[in-house]
Image (cartoon, rainbow, N blue to C red):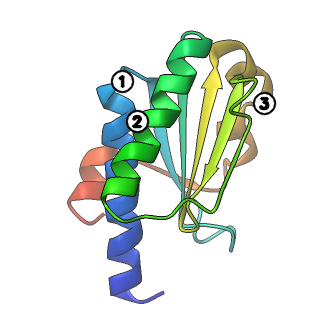
Amino acid sequence: MSNEVKRESDKMASLAYRALEDKKAENIKIINIEKVSVIADYFLIASGTNRNQVLALTDNVEEVLGRAGYEQKQKEGYQTANWVLMDYGDIIIHIFDRENRLFYDLERIWGDGEPISIEDLEKGN
C-alpha cells in the first residue's frame, strides 16, 4: 500500500475515533488488520450504553467523516442499533451495545490484527 493511501486511512480512522470519543463511546479499540485481511486497513470497535447512544455515535461518525469528504459504502444494523456496522472501505467501524459486544467479541476473532493506540495512529505508527 502506498504511503499516501495509508495516511488517508490513518486520517479517516483518527477522525472516526475522535467522533466516537466526542459522544462518550466506551472502550474504543483500533485494530490494524491490513496484514491479516484485504477487506480494510482498520477496524474500530466501540460500545454505547443504550440504543440512543449507539445511534448518536453512528450519526456523529457519519457527520464527521462526511464533512471530511469520506463516502460511506454501506451501513447495517441502524434500525436495531445493537450492532451497527459502517463500511468506509479502508476502515470499518463496529458500534455495539454492551451485550452484543461481549457476545460477538470481535477483538478475539480478529486477534491476529494489531491493536493500536490513537496516539500511535496519529503520530504515524
Where residue 86 appears, as percent x and y from the top left, is 61, 48
Q: Mark 2 points at which residue?
A: 60
Looking at numbered disc 3 in the image, what kind of residue is underneath it?
A: Tyr
**Rendered view: 108 above or below 71:** above
The residue that disc 1 covers is 23
Residue 105 point in image, percent of width and height: 72, 31
Residue shown at the point (40%, 55%) measured from the top left: 66
For the residues bearing labels 1 and 2, Cβ distance under 8 angstroms: yes
How far apart marks 3 and 1 lie (CA) works out to 23 Å
Between the residue at mark 1 and the residue at mark 2, the CA separation in whole angstroms equals 8 Å
Precedes in sequence: disc 3 or disc 1: 1
Label 3 secondary element: helix
Looking at the image, residue 70 lies above or below residue 60 = below
State which mark lies toward you, 3 or 1. 1
Q: Say few, some or many: other residues with alpha carbon within 10 Å of mark 2 (under 14 / 14 to 19 / 20 or more).
A: some
- Label 2 is placed on what type of residue? Asn
Q: Which of marks 1 and 2 is in front?
A: 2
Give the residue at x 74% y 21%. 100
Q: In this view, does 106 lie to the left or right of 58?
A: right
Q: Which of marks 2 and 3 is in front?
A: 2
